[in-house]
Image (cartoon, grey):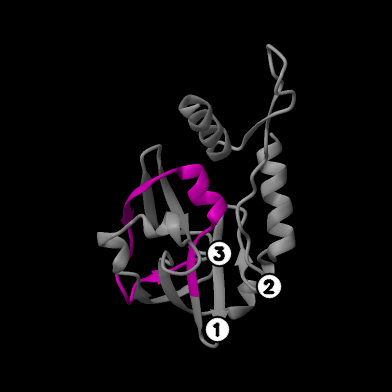
Amino acid sequence: MALKLWASSAANALRISCSGARTPFPAFSFSRCFSSVIDGLKYTSSHEWVKHEGSVATIGITDHAQGHLGEVVFVELPESGVAVAKGGSFGAVESVKATSDVNSPVSGEVIEVNAKLTETPGLINTSPYEDGWMIKVKPSDPSELNSLMGSKEYTKCCEEEDAH
């Protein structure tokens, strides 16, 4: 009984379902679990998000990105006052799987850095859109935001990427 309960819990955690519980070789299907995408944010095809409020753009990596990276163990961020360019790297995220550059969705000046990520980089995994934000930028050309994807376009982009 304990083994059956453990197997059921493990299958649920891995999102595996068995479609034919009484057959000797059950057919398995892997559920496609899509990460959360927030309406009102803008997204890049390299999986950064930006929240534009007044004269400040808050930037981080998406839930989709952190899910592919796995457990984040280190975050490299710029200092306040540094200029960033749209599409240019401003830092890196290191996980147990890989290290990835993080690109800025907009050009401008970094006005704040999330210092919490130095001590607790896992905030990117647990709260990518809230506590896991990375930098705040004062955009030099807010019209650059117009070329970014909305939530529906980003969802489609991720679905197409995951299908390959």
Question: 33 above or below 143?
Answer: above
Q: CA distance from mark 2 to mark 3?
A: 13 Å
Question: 111 above or below 103?
Answer: below
Residue at 46% in and 62% down: 127
Q: Which mark is residue 161?
A: none
- Quadrant for residue 154, please give it: bottom right
Residue pointed to by mark 3: 49
Q: Is residue 76 magenta?
A: yes
Mark closer to the chain start, 2 or 3: 3
Question: Percent x, y for residue 123?
Answer: 38, 60
Q: Mark 2 is on which residue type?
A: Asn
Residue pointed to by mark 1: 53
Q: Which residues are magenta?
A: 58-85
- Quadrant for residue 162, please give it: top right
Q: Please identify the residue farthest to the front as the structure is shown.
A: 1
Left or right, residue 107 beside residue 21: left
Q: Mark 1 is on which residue type?
A: Glu
Q: CA distance from mark 3 to mark 1?
A: 13 Å
Q: Residues within 10 Å of mark 3 (few under 14, many from 20)?
A: many
Residue at 74% in and 61% down: 152
Residue pointed to by mark 2: 146
Residue at 34% in and 70% down: 114
Question: Percent x, y for residue 107?
Answer: 50, 71
Residue at 65% in and 74% down: 40
Q: Please identify the residue farthest to the left as the structure is shown.
A: 119
Q: Mark 3 is on which residue type?
A: Trp
